[in-house]
Amino acid sequence: MTQLREPLSLISECGLPAALEVMGERWSFLILRAAFNGFVHFEDFSSELGIARNILSNRLARLVDHGVLARERCEHDKRKVEYRMTEKGRELLPAMLALRDWGLRHSDNVAPNLVLVDARDQQPIAPITIRAHDDRVLEWGDLAWAEAVEAGAPAAKECAE
Amino acid sequence: MTQLREPLSLISECGLPAALEVMGERWSFLILRAAFNGFVHFEDFSSELGIARNILSNRLARLVDHGVLARERCEHDKRKVEYRMTEKGRELLPAMLALRDWGLRHSDNVAPNLVLVDARDQQPIAPITIRAHDDRVLEWGDLAWAEAVEAGAPAAKECAE
DNA sequence: GCTATTAGGTTGCGAATAGCTACCTATTGC
DNA sequence: GCAATAGGTAGCTATTCGCAACCTAATAGC
């Protein structure tokens, strides 16, 4: 059991702190959600989210700095600015959906009246899960840590609990 | 395009704000990561994360209040308290991994020397993805919003972009 | 061309939150 | 008993949040 603790200092090299550096501040994820839903203008984010203008300005700049959104002046109305989702931003969708699913499962607010579906067959998407290389769904108890291949033979050890 | 904006006020009823209410504060996710890795004691979280004691105290209490961790006095040493992951907490693993993956993919810090593997065959787990009901991997462009089944016939509309 | 309006900010200031250090209390080991 | 350990709390400072007011550039109306 004390064994288990040892790897953590190593996996501090994991991407979580880096992700939180970008997305960990208040409002960042809600701005991202709005962006996923087609919002592009400052005033739209502002009125939808009810966020203070200076904070919104700060968050948008930060998301742009980190490449999650792209800031473009609108061609036919140069007062306007468009904040568009980048590919890097789009790659946050699984994380956002996983978080959203969890929040929904554990909240009293019953069900949303809109759900995400596969556009091809209109079937609701599956819950976000952890998968093995062959697509089997894995739970926490099925997982273990192993040394990455670059660092030698993968000598794995069980993930206790 | 303005069409797109309309659904958002409805999906404000989505679980994201609820999830952020619990996990959105600084340190919450890092505490969860430590808990996933077997940390259970106050002093262990404190020394590993380098978080201020009053903040740690506050966050642990908050996570306990929301049922993500369970607080138990240790039987054989009553000075000690154990903060253990609950099932509700464990269900945050997909969200945490998705976020971690994203942070890793987009950070300069090369690769971690430890990776999560399927304990059964020691193969690294697959990246967290969005799946259709039949396990096909879906991208943002493949998705659409539809009214939930409880609210009548699923009249879907394309997710533009 | 003059004025009003709109879009996207910035600035100042008080409130809330984070973080450091020191202190406190209940157990435990000796 | 006495010192050490575990898990906090209290007080103070530094940073961040949030509101309201203001500012500037680009358009729209006339």
Image (cartoon, coloured by chain):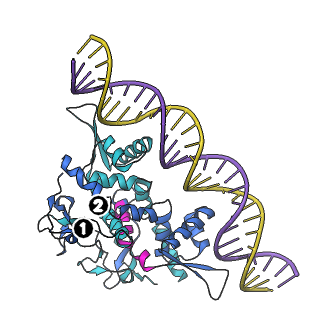
Chain colours: A cyan, B blue, C yellow, D purple
Q: Which mark is residue B143?
A: none
Q: Nearer the viewer, residue A155 or B100?
A: B100
What's under tag 2, amino acid-wise?
Leu
* Vertical placement of residue D1 versus A71, above or below: below
Q: Alpha-carbon distance for marks 2 and 1?
A: 8 Å
Q: Nearer the viewer, residue A86 or B6?
A: B6
Q: Position of residue B83 (x, y in %)?
A: 54, 77
Task: Name which quarter of the figure residue B99 lies in.
Answer: bottom left
Give the secondary structure at mark 1.
strand
Give the secondary structure at mark 2.
helix
Question: Which chain does the residue under circle 1 lie in?
Answer: B
Binning the other alpha carbons within 10 Å of mark 1 as few (below 14), some (14 to 19) or many (20 upward) gives many
Please check the rendered image and state whether residue B98 is part of the magenta-colored stretch, yes or no. yes
Question: Principal SS element in the magenta part?
Answer: helix
Q: Report if the CB atoms under discs 2 and 1 are less than 8 Å apart.
A: yes
Binning the other alpha carbons within 10 Å of mark 2 as few (below 14), some (14 to 19) or many (20 upward) gives many
Residue visible at 29% across and 42% down in the picture? A41
Q: Position of residue B62 (x, y in %)?
A: 53, 68
* Residue annotated with mark 2: A93
Residue visible at 38% across and 71% down in the picture? A108
Q: Position of residue A33 (x, y in %)?
A: 31, 55
Which span is picked out in magenta?
B84-102
Q: Is residue B30 left or right of residue A77?
A: right
* Residue annotated with mark 1: B130
Q: Position of residue B22 (x, y in %)?
A: 46, 65
